[in-house]
Image (cartoon, rainbow, N blue to C red):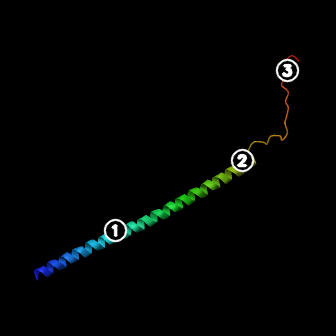
Amino acid sequence: MASDDLHSDWAAWLDTELAEAEAAALRAHRREGLQRRLRQVSVWTGAVTLVAGLGFGLVYTAQHGPAPRPAGPTISAAPTLGG
């Protein structure tokens, strides 16, 4: 009879340990999936921000940038002193 009690105590302890290990593994798996999704969202957000910033910069520069240079060659005479 004592052997049966010891066996049932051992089995109950083992079941508890296995349940805790399984729960810990499930939490780790869910945490890993969440971290992966957060990383993907972060990368997409960064990419969209970069593209939007570059697009804004190009449009702004096209509208407010320096004046275009003349197309043809220009000859400028240097001023002469005493001439």
Quadrant of the frame with the C terminus:
top right
Sort mark 2 into few (<14), some (14-19) or many (20+) by Cα contacts within 10 Å: few
Front-lying residue, 19 or 72? 72
Residue 73 appears at what percent x and percent y? 84, 36
* 2 and 1 marks in contact (CB < 8 Å): no
In the displayed structure, 37 sits above or below 82; it is below
| Distance CA(mark 3)–CA(mark 2) | 38 Å
Quick check: 55 left or right of 82? left
Q: Which residue lies most toward the top here?
A: 82
In the displayed structure, 73 sits above or below 24; it is above
Dot placed on the residue nearer the N-terminal end, 2 or 1: 1
As drawn, the label of residue 61 is 2
Residue 13 appears at what percent x and percent y? 22, 74
Of tags 3 and 2, the one toward the viewer is: 3
Quadrant of the frame with the N terminus:
bottom left
For label 3, the residue is 80
Sort mark 1 into few (<14), some (14-19) or many (20+) by Cα contacts within 10 Å: few
